[in-house]
Image: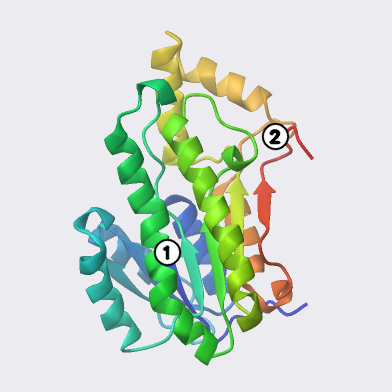
Amino acid sequence: MNLNLTNKNALVCGGSKGLGEATAIELAKLGANLTLLARNQEKLEAVSKSLDTSKGQKHDYVQADFSEGIEVLKSKIDTLLSEKNIHILINNTGGPSGGKIQDAKAEAFQNAFHNHILISHALVGWLKSGMVADNYGRIINIVSTSVRQPIEGLGVSNVTRGAMASWAKTLSKELASTGITVNNILPGTTSTERIDEILNYRAKANNSSFETEKTKMINEIPFGRFATPEEIGSVIAFVASPAASYITGASIPVDGGKIKSI
């Protein structure tokens, strides 16, 4: 099985922590050169320095805040592309705040659509010519199991994630002739800061406790535990590898069996 990513360049959004950091670690283990993108420069620098360099990899980072607008991001990506092509794009953005969809403001939908769909779409537009030129392209979106089964208390997120999955499926067909693959990874409940946010929201909404809500969430998972970020990152690294060259347009759950549908 060919999992070798030597001389491949990867851009990982949200690469300073959580699933983004775990993904970067796994990609580096396979030989990829990593560019991390996130808001916090201190964390970016720390993660970048911690990545595997045993295969001669060179890692760097781009400090950017999606709320600054697409044109500001474009200038930073243009600088990056003046130095190298990107072969692997990991679209990964923190989810919208929790809450019932009936209580959501229009601004919440607009911000989520901008940070997830519009930014991801812009990144593909800027990066795809380099993928075609180097005959290697992987676009991987870290989405959510809510694509298959909406999650209670995440109204805006459920809508946005569904839109992201449909965007990716459409894009996968349009790019198939170039050899670029487009896939979604649907993480289940994973031990990250995001899950702590959701549990705190549920505890407040249900007049309950963090631990009570955590137990309830674990009981919904056949494996009886949360995933680790590394377990999600390893699947993403596989989909980014040459071994996954015939997988495109897929939404792959990594959820410990939580989703009830086939």
Q: Residue 257 shows which numbered tag?
A: none
> At 46% across and 25% down in the image, what residue appears?
199
Task: Provide the secondary structure element on which disc 1 rests.
Answer: helix
Residue nearest the observer in this picture, 174 or 125: 174
The residue tagged 1 is: 121
Q: Tell me: residue 156, above or below residue 75.
A: above
Q: Is residue 69 visible?
A: yes
Whichever of callouts 1 and 2 sits on the residue coming sooner in the sequence is: 1
Q: Is residue 100 visible?
A: no
Residue type indicated by callout 2: Lys
Classify residue 261 as left or right of residue 227.
right
Between marks 1 and 2, how big is the CA–CA gap?
A: 29 Å
Q: Tell me: residue 133, above or below residue 62.
A: below
The crowding category of the residue bearing disc 1, from other C-alpha atoms within 10 Å (few below 14, some 14 to 19, many at least 20), is: some
> At 32% across and 71% down in the image, what residue appears?
61
Q: Tell me: residue 153, above or below residue 139.
A: above
> At 59% across and 42% down in the image, what residue appears?
147
Residue nearest the observer in this picture, 85 or 227: 85
The crowding category of the residue bearing disc 2, from other C-alpha atoms within 10 Å (few below 14, some 14 to 19, many at least 20), is: some
Task: Estimate the x, y position of residue 105 in percent, counting from the top left.
Answer: 30, 29
Classify residue 255 as left or right of residue 62.
right
Residue nearest the observer in this picture, 39 or 95: 95
The residue tagged 2 is: 258
Task: Estimate the x, y position of residue 27 in percent, counting from the top left.
Answer: 55, 70
Residue type indicated by callout 1: His
Task: Provide the secondary structure element on which disc 2 rests.
Answer: loop
